[in-house]
Image (spheres, helix red, strand yellow):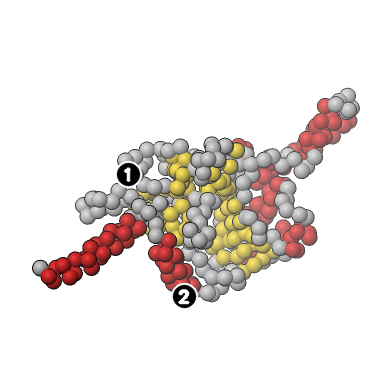
Amino acid sequence: METLKKHLVRIVLGFLLTLLLLGHAARLYQIPFISQLDAIIYDTRLRLTMPQTVDDRIVILDIDEKSLKEEGRWPWSRNRLALLIDKLFDKYGVAVAGFDIVFAEKDQSSGLKILQEIGGKQLQDDARFQTVLEKIRPQLEYDRLFAESIRNRPVILSYYFSTSAEVGEAAVGVLPQPVLPAGTFAGRGIPFEKGYGYGGNLPELMQAAAGAGHFNPIPDFDGVSRRVPLLMEFKGAYYESLSLAIVRALFGFPKVVPGTPDTSTSKDYSGLEWLELSGENFSLKIPVDPSVSALVPYRGGRGSFKYISIADVLHDRVNPEDLKGKLFWWVLPRPVFSICVQRQ
């Protein structure tokens, strides 16, 4: 009895500590010290295990000073982007193009709108002006030119969700079709990252593109982005990330199949363990965390990939073999660069 009393305080403290840690592990609450320690351990392990070598499958197409000097300040007009897409597919033979840019507003840089206003007022009765305007109109419709350049090609656009309910349900542009319909995970209680509003692309561009994905990150408590939500919920349906959409495009748009645990051994867990890309003679399982997010497999610091100036691509100064069969990924915000990834 005396021995029990002697250790009673220690037993109670140990039990309370166990409950505290279980609550943290179950994400009922977060203990800052443990979260910080876990982040330090993960970052250290990542730095020690990164290859720190140059990946020849990946080429970064850089909007560098040379590009800005030759092509002008950013943003560039969409007829130039159309030319870039044509060169990447027709001359350089890339496999997939992904844009980390939202084309939500019309490109009026051609001056067509002003010419139309003049033609409807001051020069309304000038037959010669009207004839010339109609003749050059197709060359000045930059959004249409860009849409035509991406149509019937594996080009993936992007969009973003507003993740704060306080911001409201503001919507700009249009979204692609969800990768999984509403009701897919009914009753499972999975804590998906949710969108309340969105910033999408012009309808004509979204209709021409092969697909689109969101680029919402999930910054950790310390502001570092270590993971990306592969699926986000919006109005009950589920939308894929830009990275997942690009990988699917690379392999011919295989289906996204939720990977649920074996109920015979995991009766108390109703979440997801992985997302499987399932196609003809192809299957890829991507492990996910409880919020259906995946850790970013960082490779190394600057210099892990080969850099090529976009100006050199536009002006045919690149060896086609440097880009053939690769994936073009345009990434914003600045520093602005694009990534080319070769299919393994």
- Local crowd size for mark 1, using a 10 Å CA cut-off: few (<14), some (14–19), many (≥20): few
Of residue 30 and residue 128, the one placed in the foreground of this image is 30
Pinpoint residue 176: horizontal percent, then vertical percent. 52, 41
Q: Is residue 316 above or below residue 138?
A: below
Residue 175 appears in the figure:
no
Residue shown at 54% from the left, 51% from the top: 215
Residue shown at 64% from the left, 67% from the top: 307
Residue shown at 44% from the left, 57% from the top: 294
Which quarter of the figure is the N terminus placed in? Answer: bottom left
Instruction: Report if the CB atoms under discs 2 and 1 are less than 8 Å apart.
Output: no
Q: Which residue is situated farthest in the left direction here?
A: 1
Q: Residue 154: give its label.
A: none
Of residue 26 and residue 85, the one placed in the foreground of this image is 26
Amino acid type, residue under disc 2 in the picture: Leu
Residue at mark 2: 48
Pinpoint residue 116: horizontal percent, then vertical percent. 80, 32
Residue shown at 40% from the left, 51% from the top: 291
Name the side, left or right, on which 156 lies relative to 142.
left
Residue at mark 1: 188
Amino acid type, residue under disc 1 in the picture: Arg
Quarter location, residue 94: bottom right
